[in-house]
Image (cartoon, rainbow, N blue to C red):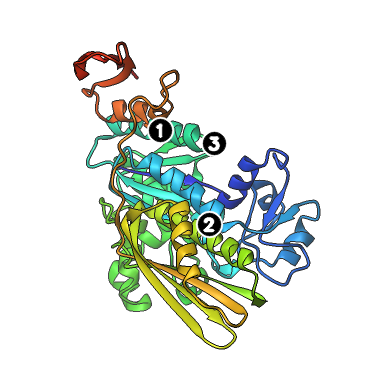
């Protein structure tokens, strides 16, 4: 079975989580109402007033004049997406994250399941039958809710596309399972806008009166291929519920590059250090989202007259923003700047999957704070026969190490 976990209106959900004053207040993310730019995100309350992806901030203000507007905070959203990814990675490594909350497309071309600009994660449960996958999917939703304080909706089906449609239709904090034998009827009544058709193909199908996936699936495949091209063959199979039953994660990217340009030349060293910290946080958020670490760090300092490049190789692959910030400050200290800085850019290479981190057994003797980072409930659900223990010091000075502590069993 395939599970899909979606957190709708993701950017606004992170803002409302981090600032209790926002609460259920209508929210638009991306700037101020008078700025001539498209919005970045919005909340469910604003969506009910007609706001859609791709709209300008001005139009969003016209539709929802009572909404609160604030600028986008990309590093915070990426960190939030990384938290969700870390939680779900405890259940399966076959995980495909999608940053649909970063979409920048015209309002008329938004797909039905991306209209809420969600963070979406599709997981391959490795052939588990539905009766076993159902409690696991429920536990995933509970774990994400507990670890991130966000409201996920979960879809469960035999193929990724159906699971994604189910997640888009599920309410937050709810699971929508689709049994294998009900896949075709479930998809048949859904709008055609769930398929990533080209604009011209969608227009021609509307002219033919094709409005739902069931109507599209009922068309003869040879005719569909002849009229709309070979690229629609896969979409026709998706509409029939015959999509691939496996998740193929994307290949890892070779490097991560971020940059920041200044409105005017900057000569103050504190401002440059602050900008480097911002860039380091953005890189760390991207790494957390992908579950990777990086080692080769490069800094480019663009001035009014020339560009200075410096690089170093970290002692070990890193994921933390503080580590990158410290290294970047060292690189910046080696640059002799004789003119105002106009832009900074950093590149992190030698990316590899992040290694597991050994937790300290006795860091917090009273509350065992480090152990709270483990999703023990999810692990026990995933591996029913596993045994988990909590260590407790009994005689720290005993000459035999094995007599200095005692292990207490932990149950789900």
Task: Please state which of residues 41 and 275 is positioned toward the viewer in this rendering.
Answer: 275
Task: Please state which of residues 375 and 231 is positioned toward the viewer in this rendering.
Answer: 375
C-alpha span from label 3 to label 2: 18 Å
151 sits left or right of 19 in the view: left
Q: Quadrant of the N terminus?
A: top left
Q: What secondary structure is found at the residue carrying circle 2? A: helix
77 sits left or right of 268 in the view: left
x and y percent of residue 285 in the render? 47, 54
The answer to whether 200 is drawn above or below residue 269 in the figure is below
| Label 2 sits on residue | 101
At horizontal 41% and vertical 20% (from top left) the residue drawn is 365
At horizontal 28% and vertical 19% (from top left) the residue drawn is 389
- Sequence-first disc among 3 and 1: 3
Outermost residue to the bottom = 305
Task: Please state which of residues 412 and 325 is positioned toward the viewer in this rendering.
Answer: 325
The answer to whether 197 is drawn above or below residue 10 in the figure is below
- Sequence-first disc among 1 and 2: 2
1 or 2: mark nearer the eye? 1
C-alpha span from label 3 to label 1: 15 Å
3 or 2: mark nearer the eye? 3
x and y percent of residue 398 in the render? 24, 13
| Label 1 sits on residue | 373
63 sits left or right of 395 in the view: right
- How would you rate the neighbour count of disc 1 (Cα within 10 Å): few for under 14, some for 14-19, many for 20 or more? few
- Sequence-first disc among 3 and 2: 2
| Label 3 sits on residue | 149
The answer to whether residue 101 of the structure is visible from this angle is: yes
What mark, if any, has residue 67 been given in the picture? none
x and y percent of residue 403 in the render? 22, 13
């Amino acid at each position: 079975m395939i599970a899909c976990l979606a957190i709708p209106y993701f950017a606004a959900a992170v803002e409302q989580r981090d600032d209790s004053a926002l609460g259920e207040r209508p929210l638009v993310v991306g700037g101020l109402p008078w700025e001539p730019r498209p919005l970045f995100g919005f909340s469910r309350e604003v969506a009910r007033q007609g706001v859609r992806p791709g709209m300008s901030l001005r139009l969003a203000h016209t539709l929802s004049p009572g909404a609160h507007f604030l600028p986008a905070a990309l590093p915070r959203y990426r960190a939030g997406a990384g938290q969700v990814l870390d939680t779900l990675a405890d259940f399966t490594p076959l995980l495909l994250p999608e940053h649909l909350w970063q979409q920048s497309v015209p309002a008329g071309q938004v797909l039905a399941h991306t209209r809420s600009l969600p963070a979406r994660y599709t997981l391959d449960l490795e052939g588990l039958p539905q009766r076993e996958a159902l409690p696991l999917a429920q536990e995933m939703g509970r774990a994400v809710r507990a670890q991130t304080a966000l409201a996920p909706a979960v879809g469960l089906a035999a193929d990724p596309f159906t699971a994604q449609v189910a997640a888009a239709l599920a309410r937050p904090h709810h699971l929508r399972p689709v049994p294998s034998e009900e896949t075709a009827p479930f998809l048949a009544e859904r709008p055609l806008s769930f398929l990533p058709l080209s604009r011209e193909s969608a227009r021609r199908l509307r002219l033919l009166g094709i409005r739902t996936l069931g109507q599209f699936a009922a068309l003869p495949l040879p005719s569909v291929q002849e009229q709309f091209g070979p690229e629609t063959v896969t979409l026709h199979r998706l509409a029939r519920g015959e999509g691939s039953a496996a998740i193929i994660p994307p290949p890892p990217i070779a490097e991560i590059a971020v940059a920041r340009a200044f409105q005017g030349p900057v000569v103050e060293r504190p401002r440059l250090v602050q900008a480097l910290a911002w860039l380091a946080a953005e890189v760390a958020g991207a790494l957390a989202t992908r579950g990777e670490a990086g080692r080769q760090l490069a800094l480019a300092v663009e001035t009014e007259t020339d560009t200075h490049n410096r690089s170093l190789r970290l002692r070990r692959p890193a994921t933390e923003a503080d580590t990158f910030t410290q290294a970047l400050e060292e690189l910046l200290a080696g640059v002799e700047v004789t003119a105002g800085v106009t832009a900074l850019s950093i590149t992190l290479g030698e990316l590899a999957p992040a290694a597991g981190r050994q937790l300290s057994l006795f860091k917090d003797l009273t509350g065992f704070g480090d152990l709270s980072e483990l999703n023990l409930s999810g692990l026990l659900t995933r591996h029913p026969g596993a045994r988990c223990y909590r260590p407790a010091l009994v005689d720290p000075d005993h000459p035999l190490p094995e007599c200095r502590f005692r292990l207490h069993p932990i149950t789900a």
